[in-house]
Image: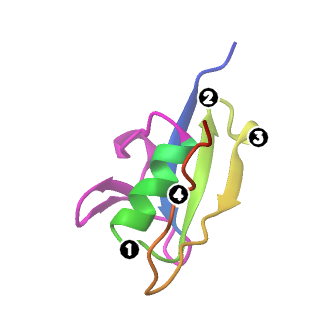
Amino acid sequence: MQRMRILLQKKETGLYFKDIDAWARGSAEAMDFVSSTAAIDFCVTNKLADVQLVLKFEEEKYDIVLAVVTPKNSRVERPTPSP
């Protein structure tokens, strides 16, 4: 089974998120998120725009790239679970 990494990448430059205010050219240096939800929440919390979610596999041909759409100037409300 192939290991999958969950990364954030700037659409315009192709750089991968490494740390706050730090972006890397290669995916090997990128921060690996525990889940896609955590990565998206991170984008919303830190107001990261123009990024995409990359599901990175050992074999590049299996990589999946997904757009991340974050609300601009609005607060994300999470629904409260009903009893």
Identified at 52% across, 57% down, the residue is 78
> Which residue sits furthest top?
1
Type of amino acid at the residue the image marks with label 4: Arg
- Disc 2 element: loop
Type of amino acid at the residue the image marks with label 1: Lys
Q: Is residue 72 left or right of residue 52?
A: left
The reply to whether the C-beta atoms of the residues labelled 1 and 2 are less than 8 Å apart is no
Real-space Cα distance between discs 4 and 1? 17 Å
* Residue 3 location (% of width, % of height): 59, 22
- Disc 4 element: loop
Mark 1 highlights which residue? 47
Residue 61: assigned label: 3
- Name the dominant secondary structure of the magenta segment: loop
Image quarter of the C terminus: top right
Q: Is residue 23 left or right of residue 64?
A: left
Mark 1 Cα within 10 Å, few/some/many (few <14, many 20+)? few
Figure check: 73 above or below 13: below
Which residues, given as a range, are shown in magenta? 11-35
* Residue 69 location (% of width, % of height): 61, 71
Pick whichever, 77 or 7, lies toward us.
Answer: 77
Identified at 76% across, 40% down, the residue is 61
The reply to whether the C-beta atoms of the residues labelled 4 and 1 are less than 8 Å apart is no
- Disc 3 element: helix
Identified at 58% across, 43% down, the residue is 81
> Which residue sits furthest front?
83
Residue 58: assigned label: 2
